[in-house]
């Protein structure tokens, strides 16, 4: 299995689990559920617990380092501030579109109501909008870290990282330590994700034995929702910004970045596509090298519109299949978590699944949902990576236009 990439291993694990689950269901009938819960599900539970173990140290260290890097006073001039603002605003729109897609298409409605029984024993905290906004700022950062309050951890990490960069040399020792911590967590994450095929296999077997094959219909709608949402976001959000603020023809923009989009779709790596993205922006769109060399690498690090849209769809799908009605406050929490956490997603193996677990944790949704999504994650990754680099290029063009740095 070493020669296969991670996504292929997870897909194979998902497929084996699907076939094994069907065989057990047919062979054992009603006894399959009890057998899988007792003997197979514990393997998946261990995998879920390993992911939970990663969340707090990973998100704090990676967000601290991400905030420290963009908080460099030399970078955060007019161009830097403008770039980050556009990235965060478009990410916000992406999450909202993802939530709307899942709300309209209702992929969870196609899944057996048996999932609701699993959620019966799970206490999901209902929070109002006002409470969500008030609780953004931690009264006690240590308590937030120990209790795993995701939004408060994100806010504290962002403040800490920016402050560390603003105090100059005095902050460098802490930044170096946190950078080392982040690298350690990335390595641990890589170890945990190597176990993902086994965890996903076990959890899918248990899902099929308990709920049957209705889950597959829901997953097909999830794929449709992510792809449709990505198309809407690309043409309506990016297209509108490119046309109005960037003063650039929409069709010419998409034609110019098409080679980079094809590479992103096939490789599912924003960083790996970066050379092609830079070339397309400079040669086909006419953006100056001075702007592209700053805006595009920064976008590959913090601009995760596709990932955020995917998280919005998947979070709502998981809430639907478990029969959990989310309050306005919880939906706002999903939007804020996905938007702010986008700063710290780069460089993490299996980033999509890890960040999805972060979003689920922020509103108390069942973590078992991660395994359900894992089997189609590669298909979704192709769409979200393409949207990510499209957003990088749109913001790059807009910033260049407003700074008078277009060569055409």
Image (cartoon, rainbow, N blue to C red):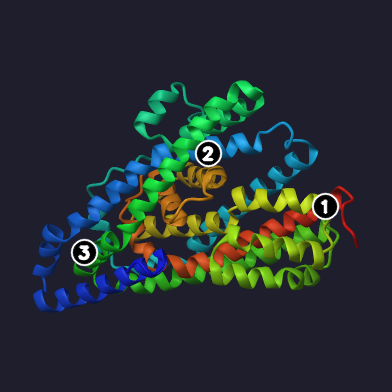
At 38% from the left edge and 66% from the top edge, which residue is drawn? 109
Q: Residues within 10 Å of mark 3 (few under 14, many from 20)?
A: many
Q: Which mark is residue 206?
A: 3
In the rendered image, which quarter is residue 194 located in? bottom left
When the figure is inspected, residue 174 is found, relative to residue 348, above or below; the finding is: above
Q: Which residue is farthest front?
A: 3
At 16% from the left edge and 61% from the top edge, which residue is drawn? 40
* Mark toward the start of the polypeptide (3 vs 2): 2
Under tag 3, what secondary structure? helix
Of 154 and 199, which appears nearest the observer?
199
Q: Which residue is mark 2?
A: 63
Q: Quadrant of the C terminus?
A: bottom right
At 32% from the left edge and 51% from the top edge, which residue is drawn? 366
At 29% from the left edge and 51% from the top edge, which residue is drawn? 48
When the figure is inspected, residue 180 is found, relative to residue 213, above or below; the finding is: above
The picture places residue 323, in percent across and down from the top left corner, at 33, 56
Q: CA distance from mark 3 to mark 2?
A: 35 Å
Left or right relative to 251: residue 188: left
* Mark toward the start of the polypeptide (3 vs 1): 3
In the rendered image, which quarter is residue 292 located in? bottom right
Asked if the residue under mark 2 is in contact with the one under mark 3, i.e. CB atoms within 8 Å, the reply is no
The picture places residue 284, in percent across and down from the top left corner, at 80, 68
* Mark toward the start of the polypeptide (1 vs 2): 2
Q: Which residue is mark 1?
A: 400
Q: Quadrant of the N terminus?
A: bottom left
Under tag 1, what secondary structure? helix
Of 297 and 135, which appears nearest the observer?
297
Query: Can the viewer see residue 169?
Result: yes
């Amino acid at each position: 299995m070493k020669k296969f990439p991670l996504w292929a291993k997870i897909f194979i694990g998902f497929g084996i689990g699907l076939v094994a689950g069907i065989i057990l269901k047919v062979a054992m009938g009603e006894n399959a559920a009890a057998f899988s819960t007792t003997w197979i599900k514990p393997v998946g539970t261990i995998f879920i617990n390993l992911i939970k173990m990663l969340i707090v140290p990973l998100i704090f260290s990676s967000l601290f380092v991400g905030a420290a890097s963009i908080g460099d006073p030399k970078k955060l001039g007019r161009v830097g501030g403008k770039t980050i603002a556009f990235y965060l605003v478009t990410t916000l729109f992406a999450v909202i579109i993802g939530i709307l897609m899942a709300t309209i298409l209702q992929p969870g409605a196609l899944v057996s109501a048996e999932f609701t029984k699993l959620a019966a024993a799970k206490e999901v905290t209902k929070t109002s909008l006002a409470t969500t906004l008030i609780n953004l700022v931690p009264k006690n950062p240590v308590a937030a870290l120990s209790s795993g309050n995701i939004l408060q951890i994100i806010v504290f990490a962002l403040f800490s990282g920016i402050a560390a960069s603003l105090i100059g040399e005095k902050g460098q020792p802490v930044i170096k330590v946190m950078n080392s911590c982040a690298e350690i967590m990335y390595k641990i994450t890589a170890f945990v994700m190597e176990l993902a095929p086994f965890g996903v296999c076990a959890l899918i077997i248990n899902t099929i034995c308990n709920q049957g094959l209705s889950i597959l219909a829901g997953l097909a709608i999830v794929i449709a929702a992510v792809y449709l949402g990505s198309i809407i976001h690309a043409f309506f959000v990016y297209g509108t910004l490119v046309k109005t603020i960037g003063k650039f023809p929409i069709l010419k923009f998409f034609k110019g970045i098409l080679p980079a989009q094809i590479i992103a779709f096939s490789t599912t790596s924003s960083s790996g596509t970066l050379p092609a993205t830079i070339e397309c922006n400079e040669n086909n769109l006419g953006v100056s090298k001075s702007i592209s060399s700053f805006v595009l690498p920064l976008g590959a690090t913090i601009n995760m519109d596709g990932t955020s849209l995917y998280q919005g769809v998947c979070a709502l799908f998981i809430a639907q299949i478990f029969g959990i009605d989310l309050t306005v406050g919880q939906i706002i929490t999903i939007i804020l978590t996905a938007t702010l956490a986008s700063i710290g997603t780069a460089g993490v193996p299996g980033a999509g699944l890890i960040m999805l677990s972060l979003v689920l944790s922020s509103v108390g949704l069942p973590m078992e949902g991660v395994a359900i999504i894992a089997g189609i994650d590669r298909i979704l990754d192709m769409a979200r990576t393409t949207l990510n680099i499209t957003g990088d290029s749109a913001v790059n063009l807009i910033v260049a236009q407003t700074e008078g740095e277009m060569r055409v």
